[in-house]
Image (tube, grey):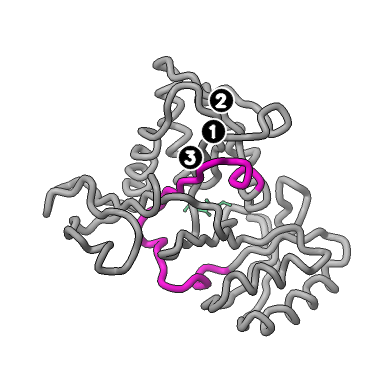
Amino acid sequence: MSTQDLKRAAAARAVALVTDGMRLGLGTGSTAAFFVELLGARVRQGLAVIGVPTSEATRAAAQAAGIPLTTLDETPELDLTVDGADEIDAGLRLVKGGGGALLREKIVAAASRRMVVIADGDKRVAVLGRFPLPIEVVPFGLGATRRAVEAALPRAGCAGALTLRQAADGSALVTDGGHLILDAHLGRIPDPDALAHALAAIPGVVEHGLFLGLATGAILASREPASFGEAASRGEAGSPGEAAPPGGGAPRLDLLGTV
Ligand SMILES: O=C(CO)[C@H](O)[C@H](O)COP(=O)(O)O
């Protein structure tokens, strides 16, 4: 079973959460793209929803899938956002922004009553920080902002290099909001709240990829068969193994938080 299969399985489980009339936040990334594709199939069967995309890429995918779209200006409160993540810990804290859409993703998640993360099980970590933390910054004053971020890291117990994210052609990647991204290679983030506060206090920082207190649930798909009670033995919220005959072909779906 490929990682793509796992992502698709998590997305399919999330589509089952959607009911008629819902106002949805539509995430960005390869897992969220499966959700958009599968949701589109339900819409074409008659499901009535409206969605707010978290990126121009998701907007295009949702339009192609036939999902009616709205904006947070027209629809400032959403029922459910379904989005991927680069890392998730046992407290449903996330690192996001690997696809460069963290700013819109966070605005949409914050406007939603529920945010359910969909991911393959490899995204689960004991301590956040293995994945480089995206920090979205305005182009003006980049050098000064970079120095301020470097100075803030040790105050939050972190250390590591910052790299300016590049597009495929080698130029600096520009986000949908016209900003740049510094990726912080930290290895571990011992105190995510402290780092989030330190970064938010820097004027040139628009947002960062720490999503704290936003996710209300998660669906994590793994290859290994379910072992009953495993999540509880890890001291985590949620229930393990919704669909996993031992040795069978179905992925195991671990549900964290409220799904
Ligand atoms: O935060 C994101 C985009 O900004 C994505 O949700 C995150 O990078 C996960 O992507 P994928 O589902 O492709 O693994």
Q: CA distance from mark 2 to mark 3?
A: 16 Å
Q: Nearer the viewer, mark 1 or mark 3?
A: 1
Q: CA distance from mark 1 to mark 2?
A: 6 Å
Q: Quadrant of the C terminus?
A: top left
Residue 73 is inside the magenta segment: no
Element type at marker 2? strand
Element type at marker 1? strand
Q: Identify which residue is drawn at 33% across, 51% down.
A: 255
* Marks 2,3: beta carbons within 8 A: no
| Magenta stretch in the rendered image | 107-132
Q: Which residue is mark 2?
A: 50
- Amino acid type, mark 3: Ala
- Amino acid type, mark 2: Ile
Where in the figure is residue 65, as x and y percent of width and height? 50, 25
Q: Which residue is mark 1?
A: 24
* Earlier-in-chain disc, 1 versus 2: 1
Q: Which residue is mark 3?
A: 33
* Earlier-in-chain disc, 2 versus 3: 3
Is the CB of the residue bearing disc 3 within 8 angstroms of ligand 1?
yes
Q: Identify which residue is drawn at 54% across, 38% down.
A: 26
Front residue of this view, candidates 105 and 74: 74
Where in the figure is residue 228, as x and y percent of width and height? 17, 58
Q: Quadrant of residue 146?
A: bottom right
Q: Is residue 58 visible?
A: yes
207 versus 107 height, above or below: below
Dot 3: within a 10 Å radius of its alpha carbon, few (fewer than 14), some, or many (20 or more) residues? Answer: many
Q: Quadrant of residue 164?
A: bottom right
Where in the figure is residue 210, as x and y percent of width and height? 59, 62
* Earlier-in-chain disc, 1 versus 3: 1
Q: CA distance from mark 1 to mark 3?
A: 14 Å
